[in-house]
Image (tube, rainbow, N blue to C red):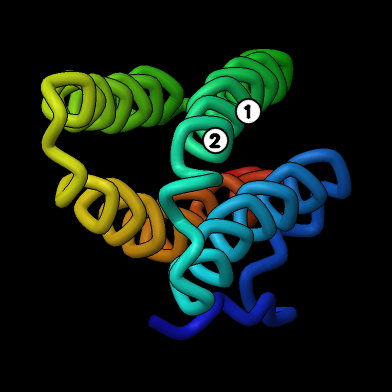
Amino acid sequence: MNNIEWKKEYELGVEEIDNQHKKLVGIVNEFLEAQANHSEEKVIGPVIKELVDYTKVHFESEELHMKKHRYPLLIQHKQEHKALIARIVKILKDLGSGNRDVADDIFQLLKNWLLNHILDKDRQYGNFLKNGKV
């Protein structure tokens, strides 16, 4: 699996959120590197915990920022965040049941969701901040 390479096109122009997105990408890459080195068993627990914890922090931060700027699509954005957390919780339950194959599922989910979410939904917010409209 290839690491995610951060690209300028992922930036929203909101330093705090951009830095959080970079950190999330870094955490995903940490697991992908461990997987490439066949050492994911050693890092899967701590990395997933860090990823889930930091994702929650990021979502709260992003949602507060959107609320502060009266983003009209805040409710929909929060629903997307909630849906992702629900999917992660389900995968973590499978992982807790001893199903180690779900590690790939969670990182594929997060890798794809993270990039798609940044490029679509978060970009809409960045455009709203720049243009004052959705």
Residue 11, image x, y percentages? 71, 65
Q: Which residue corresponds to the image point at 57% horizontal and 71% vertical from the top-left?
A: 33
Q: Which residue corresponds to the image point at 57% horizontal and 21% vertical from the top-left?
A: 53
The residue tagged 2 is 51
Residue 71, image x, y percentages? 55, 27
- Contact (Cβ within 8 Å) of mark 1 with mark 2: yes
Q: Nearer the viewer, residue 40 or 12?
A: 40
Which corner quadrant of the image does residue 63 belong to?
A: top right
The residue tagged 1 is 54
Residue 132, image x, y percentages? 66, 44
Type of residue at label 2? Leu
Q: Answer left or right for 44 relative to 58.
A: left
Q: Which mark is residue 71?
A: none
Q: Nearer the viewer, residue 95 or 123?
A: 95
Secondary structure under badge 2? Answer: helix
Check disc 1: other Cα within 10 Å, few if <14, some if 14-19, many if 20+: some
Q: Answer left or right for 14 relative to 45.
A: right
The N terminus sits in image quarter: bottom left
Judge whether 110 appears above or below 64 on screen.
Answer: below
Type of residue at label 1? Tyr
Which corner quadrant of the image does residue 115 belong to?
A: bottom left
Q: How many marks?
A: 2
Secondary structure under badge 1? Answer: helix
Q: Nearer the viewer, residue 34 or 17?
A: 34
Check disc 2: other Cα within 10 Å, few if <14, some if 14-19, many if 20+: many
Mark 1–mark 2 Cα distance, whole angstroms, equals 5 Å
Task: Kindly give the residue lying farthest to the right in the view shown.
Answer: 15
